[in-house]
Amino acid sequence: MLKMEVKLEGLEEAKKMFSSELIRKATRSAIDRSATYGKKCIAESMPEYYHIKYRDVKAAIQIKRTTQRLNEADIITKGKPLDFVDYFHATQDRSGVSVNVAKDHVTRFPHAFMNIAGNSGKRVIMKRTGRNRYPTTGKKMIGASIPRLTGSAKIFNKVKEKILAHLPEEFKDQLEKRMRVKL
């Protein structure tokens, strides 16, 4: 969940000029629209750094909108760990398994191997826990989840800058929209 606080400039002057109800509605609407814009920014910036699809990120993000009492919106990411083989282009060689989670480097799992899991026919990455060769029981290697990837500093800072730049413009637009309705 992204947490940030924003102080709108010019809010005090607007409170003197317009009714408090108009300011409250414009503020709530601007916060909600900025949260939706933040969802879009997260979904766009994830594929720049990681091997993950825009639609998968967008589907994992939920927005908790403002309420009458609370002028804050939450951007919440939910999701299970993603499978290395399906999402992150896992390949096996003599020394182990290589996975491309991030676009700038390769993650290696030495002594790991790819195996067919049970009756499902799905390929998984495993690492033996004991010394016996058979049966191939071992620890199943699980990939990164979307919430963990969105929590990285480079994604958070990039999205925060965009939202902070977007919110004052959105507040101004919502205020003008409400003024046109009032007249």
Image (spheres, helix red, strand yellow):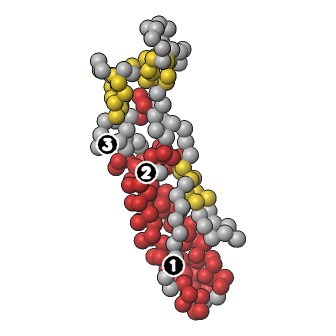
Say if 31 sits above or below 110 in the image. Answer: below
What's the mark number on residue 116? Answer: none
Q: Residue at x 48, y 62 (%)?
A: 37
- Residue 23 in the image: x percent, y percent? 61, 82
**In which image quadrant can residue 79 be found?**
top right
What is the CA distance from the residue labelled 2 to the residue labelled 1? Answer: 26 Å
3 or 2: mark nearer the eye: 2
What is the CA distance from the residue labelled 3 to the residue labelled 2? Answer: 14 Å
**3 or 1: tag closer to the N-terminus:** 1
User: Residue at label 3?
Assistant: 103
**2 or 1: tag closer to the N-terminus:** 1
Extreme-front residue of the structure: 131
Q: Is any part of residue 88 visible from this angle? A: yes
Please count the marks in the image: 3
User: Residue at label 2?
Assistant: 152
Q: Is any part of residue 171 visible from this angle? A: no
Q: Residue at x 64, y 88 (%)?
A: 19
Disc 2 element: loop
Q: Residue at x 62, y 86 (%)?
A: 182
User: Residue at label 1?
Assistant: 8
Say if 164 sits above or below 159 in the image. Answer: below
Q: Amino acid at mark 1?
A: Leu
**3 or 2: tag closer to the N-terminus:** 3
Say if 178 sits above or below 28 in the image. Answer: below
Disc 1 element: loop
- Residue 108 in the image: x percent, y percent? 34, 30
2 or 1: mark nearer the eye: 2
Q: Amino acid at mark 2?
A: Ser
What is the CA distance from the residue labelled 3 to the residue labelled 1? Answer: 36 Å
